[in-house]
Amino acid sequence: MIVTVAVIALLVLPTAGEPVPGKAAAVGTVQPSAPSSTQPEAAPETAPDLPSGEPPQPVTATPEFAKQVKANELGLIPVIMYHRIMKKRLASIDRTPSQLRQELEKLARQGYVPITAREFATGDIRVPAGKFPVVLTFDDGHASHFALDAQGAPKKDTAVAIIYDVARKYPDFRPVATFWINSYPFGLQNQSDQAKAVQWLNEHGFEVANHTWGHPNLGVLPKKKVREQIVRLERLLKKLGAPLSDTLALPFGSMPHPKKVARTGSWGGMSYDFAGVFLAGAEPSLSPYAKKFDRNAIQRIQSNGKRGECRKWCSQYWLEWLNKHPGERFVSDGDPQRISIPRKSRGNITAKRIGQVNPY
């Protein structure tokens, strides 16, 4: 599978014919929401108990064990892209709370276990043996992604609350995700409220990272302006008491020129160096251990059904495709120190990972 560049348009119809990994169609994005005047509820001293976002305990994978669980850590990984979570959808890429819940429960039943975009891009994949990693990503830091209620729990029908609901129902479903934010994270105007939200998410195992300051089309900006957009958001994260970003999601999936300025650069005395830069569509990603994996342009899949522009390019299609082609999917060996693959696949692994290979 050859990774291609993503989308710059809002909604583009896919081409006809049977899609295969490497021939991506376009998917849409929306502009970030305007700041909200709603302040988060004050949390009590003791918040309700929540499922842990800690990764599972590792095992030691021998070649015999890897074969038994059919490990294939060079397989494809779905990185699913979400935008607003709304009871009444305003755009085709919005999802309702019910739609998000149904998709996450389907992932849990099928054996998928979430990891963050940071963990994925750095190759720190800690998933139980025989299970499949999935990366849940939410763009634009919308108010529907995260808020706390009066009891200090994630507010009902927000993305975080739904993730925890699914984790309670399916204990193997690790409650983590990545939230790529702009200048008003989660619709909050007050910097103190922004800091509380971002720190809460980081403390509970979620990743909060860079989606640029103002969500511009980076493909039409000069290099200096691209760097400014990225660094201004990094400065905000620092002010909010959050770690600097290890990942960046490109607004509209639009790649700047030259491509490398999205991943590394500096502006105003501050530098950035991301482990991964993520596109906006439209196929499963190669394993980060694969020789052809391009951390400068990581594929994602829009969460959606199989209508219109998503007939063959969004999450419902690709999850069905992966179920029909289990040999193409990443299957974990449960051992983060080893990379277990069928012996015939040894030639496809990146050179820096050769010492970790556990062939069978």
Image: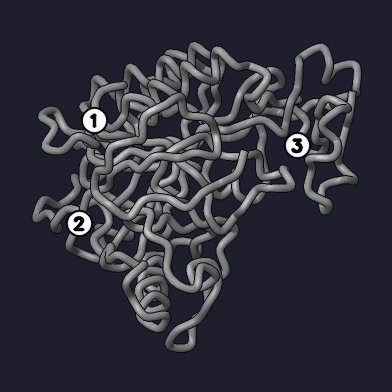
Furthest toward the bottom, the residue is: 269
Q: Which image quarter holds the C terminus?
A: top right
Task: Check if mark 3's residue and mark 1's residue have beta carbons within 8 Å.
Answer: no
Q: Residues within 10 Å of mark 3 (few under 14, many from 20)?
A: many
Image vertical order of residue 85 relative to residue 105, above or below: below
Instruction: Say whether disc 3 or disc 1 marks the residue closer to the N-terminus.
Output: 1
Three-letter code, disc 2: Leu
Q: Secondary structure at mark 1?
A: loop
Residue 109 visible somewhere in the drawing:
yes
Q: What residue is at 46 percent from the left and 58 percent from the top? A: 248
Which x, y percent locates residue 53? 52, 34
Q: To which residue does mark 3 refer?
A: 336
Q: Which badge, 2 or 1, is on the more N-terminal residue? A: 1
Sequence-first disc among 2 and 3: 2
Instruction: Give the spatial CA distance, label 2 vs label 1.
Output: 21 Å
Residue 310, x across and y down, in percent: 31, 29
Given residues 190 and 91, the one toward you in this image is 91
Q: Quadrant of residue 37?
A: bottom left
The residue indicated by pointer 2 is 188
Q: Secondary structure at mark 3?
A: loop
- Confirm whether residue 44 shows in the render: no
How many other residues sit within 10 Å of disc 1, few (<14), some (14-19) or many (≥20)?
many
